[in-house]
Amino acid sequence: MAQISALPKHFLSDKVEHFTESVIREMTRQAMQYGAVNLAQGFPDFSAPEEIKRAAQEAIAADINQYAITWGAKSLRNAIAQKMQEWQGIEVDPEREVVVCCGSTEAMIATLLAVCNKGDEVVVFEPFYENYGPDSILSGARPRFVSLRPPASARDEWTFDAQELREAFQPQTKAIIVNTPNNPTGKVFTRKELELIRDLCVEYNVLAITDEIYEHILYDGTEHISIARLDGMKERTITINGLSKSYSVTGWRVGWAVAPAAITNAIRKVHDFLTVGAPAPLQEAGAAALNLPASYYRELAERYRTRRDHLIPALEKAGFRCYPPRGAYYVMTDISAFGYASDMEFAAYLVKDIGIACVPGSSFYKHPRDGAQQVRFAFCKKPETIDEAARRLEKLSRLSRYR
Ligand code: GLN
């Protein structure tokens, strides 16, 4: 049998040459291989809420086991519209402005496939969640990156330069991807920053594609603002969200896009031919999830705050410089104190010798050198998991002292 690497190049599409497999998912495989504590991929290792598990079981028992309407079960679309109205004051027509997809991952790529033409550009803040690069490439567009600069101290925030952002907007710019709260930095974009983005989108006639999957995971009194809520933005915004992070069900693969009717129609067409539909019984359970009381979200955020405040001191003690997040459940760190030439080398050492999986920083940058002294840790884990990581980190501080 021929090895995959020996296949003639003409069997492969040119597109796949331009990106690699996900490093985040690869680190999870390595964590399993080495029996490491997995602080790499962002998925909870604790139970999902009982009420929504029950709703899923009941939906299966009630035989909701065939295709849902391709663009989403009515109960879930209604719940999405109602929740956006209640939480963000955004009026959404569940019949014409919502597409339910297989996770926000599919919602993002279906959106880009629906709006991009060859030669279009998509503005992406960097460091970025690694899917956005391949998503843009697969949709024929070119990503153009704008730097988020690390905070100078724990009290400061990740920032961007307004002029650099303005310069990224070009005649060929089709869209900007905004992910707030942000993965991997934990930045929560302020109203002022979003207004600046809004002004540029209006001036250059550009779409905003906003990934709001971490909307309820907020710390230190920060507020989540959907960009669609700003004047002039509803008609040019695609808001992407899903069940995974708010309800701790990353394996259910239920997400959605909310957009003006004409854009929704285009996304629905792409989605239909990509996947037909998201899992029907889990969409019913999704409707139950979106109806959870406000106290549920407060408790979720508070639980993650305690995890953040548990992991960061352990990392700092071991020698990492941490950039404390204001939202989402990741902490970016600087690893210069350990004296490694690259993040990949350091992450390999950490997973094999120390028994902790993280994500090498370079996977969040276009040029690997920009992330060569950073790694990301996820803290959406049980307290025991973080305790175990903290114990293993002690070994790192002892070892690194003798390096
Ligand atoms: N968002 C998660 C992360 O950044 C993983 C998502 C995924 O692997 N699909 O780790």
Image (cartoon, rainbow, N blue to C red):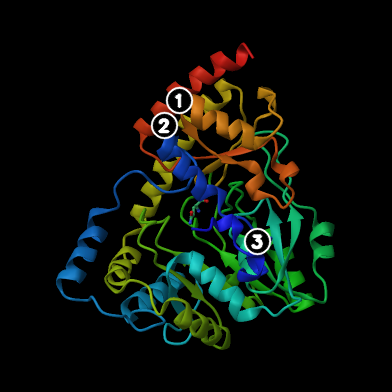
Circle 1/circle 2 CB separation < 8 Å: yes
Q: Which residue does the image show at 64% across and 54% down from the upper left?
A: 128
Q: For label 3, count other residues whose C-alpha is less than 10 Å away and answer few (under 14), some (14-19) or many (20+).
A: many
Please tell me the numbered disc located at residue 177.
Answer: none
Residue at the spot of label 1:
390
Q: Position of residue 393 (x, y in %)?
A: 50, 23
Q: Position of residue 106 (x, y in %)?
A: 49, 69
**Residue 232 vs residue 208, the one in the foreground:** 208
The vertical placement of 93 against 47, above or below, is: below
Q: Secondary structure at mark 3?
A: helix
Kindly identify the residue that appears in the image at 39 percent across and 53 percent down. Answer: 297
1 or 3: tag closer to the N-terminus? 3
Relative placement, left or right, of 52 versus 232 is left
* Residue at the disc numbered 3: 133
Q: Amino acid at mark 1?
A: Ala
State whether label 2 is within 8 Å of ligand 1. no
